Amino acid sequence: MHCEVGVAQAQSTWKTCRNCKQQYDPAENHVKACRFHTAHYGGETKRKFESVYKGGTMDTPGAGEISHYWHCCGSPDPFDLGCEASPHLSYDE
Ligand SMILES: [Zn+2]
Ligand SMILES: [Zn+2]
């Protein structure tokens, strides 16, 4: 019961970020509070990945296999918070 009251009070001051669509506390906002990716997460062949991110040689074993990654930074982790950072930006700023 005590917890629910605390949460309600905290959320009343929160805003929604138009970059990441998450709720944030303006008092906790800072220049790297908002993490996001600039491109989509999706599947691509290993050959393409290496040619883009590692200057690949095109003769890597298994280079035709599909791997999934963020196309902006090459991170293979779908839960990666983001490769770019900025302050959260509310809809009324
Ligand atoms: Zn944000
Ligand atoms: Zn990224």
Image (cartoon, grey):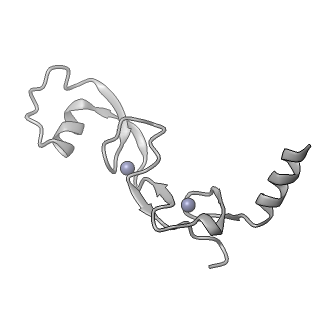
Q: Is residue 17 left or right of residue 80?
A: right
Residue 25, percent across and down?
Answer: 66, 63
Above or below for 30 versus 44 = below
Q: Nearer the viewer, residue 76 or 46?
A: 76
Q: Residue at x 36, y 38 (%)?
A: 69
Above or below for 20 versus 64 = below
Q: Residue at x 34, y 46 (%)?
A: 71
Which quarter shows the C terminus? bottom right
Q: Is residue 40 left or right of residue 14?
A: left
Q: Nearer the viewer, residue 48 or 73?
A: 73
Above or below for 37 versus 42 = below
Residue 51, percent across and down?
Answer: 16, 41
Above or below for 81 versus 18 = above
Residue 47, percent across and down?
Answer: 19, 33
Q: Residue at x 43, y 47 (%)?
A: 40
Which quarter shows the N terminus? top right
Residue 9, percent across and down?
Answer: 83, 60
